[in-house]
Amino acid sequence: MQSNTYLNFNGNCEEAFKFYEKSFGAKVEGMMTHEGSPAEANTPPEWRKKILHARLKIGDAIVMASDAPPGYYHKPQGFSVSLGVDTPADAERVFKELSERGEVRMPMAQSFFAARFGMVTDRFGIPWIVICEKG
């Protein structure tokens, strides 16, 4: 059995995944639009280039996502995507990237349980925890 995070975006999934790919050193493994899919016929013309399904590989983890159809998007709440990094320097770098045009909920700092820990909601509305555990 496997569990993967599946995110919904408000029409900016492609932009978000390209940002994550650059910021995390991740790899977008797939990105499918409504256009050219069986869903195209039932999709408004202005939404056909939006993402029907995307897959991002971050280290050994997989994050999947899509653009929520018009009228179905809800702001994420009640969860955070946790991103474990190997070094304090990586934690600082990734946190800084996610914070750009985002909202810091807990500044990056050393804590009693981690070499670095911080919480941020990125510019796309996705809540993240960045943690570098103590060696």
Image (tube, rainbow, N blue to C red):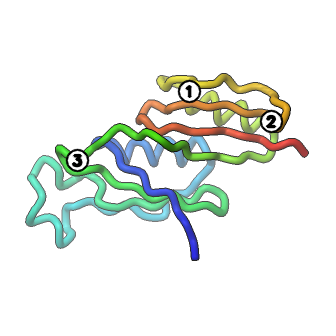
Residue ID for mark 1: 99
Reply above or below: 55 against 117.
Answer: below
Residue ID for mark 2: 88
First-in-chain label (3 vs 1): 3
Q: Residue furthest right?
A: 135
Residue ID for mark 3: 72
How far separated are the C-alphas under marks 3 and 1? Answer: 26 Å
Which residue is located at x 42 percent, y 34 percent? 125
**SS class of the residue under badge 1?**
helix
Labels 1 and 2 touching (C-beta < 8 A): no
Labels 3 and 1 touching (C-beta < 8 A): no
Q: Quadrant of the N terminus?
A: bottom right
First-in-chain label (3 vs 2): 3
How far separated are the C-alphas under marks 3 and 2? Answer: 38 Å
**SS class of the residue under badge 2?**
helix
Other-residue count near label 3 (Cα within 10 Å), few / some / many at <14 / 14–19 / ≥20: few
How far separated are the C-alphas under marks 1 and 2? Answer: 16 Å
Q: Position of residue 62 (x, y in %)?
A: 55, 61
Name the amino acid, label 3: Tyr
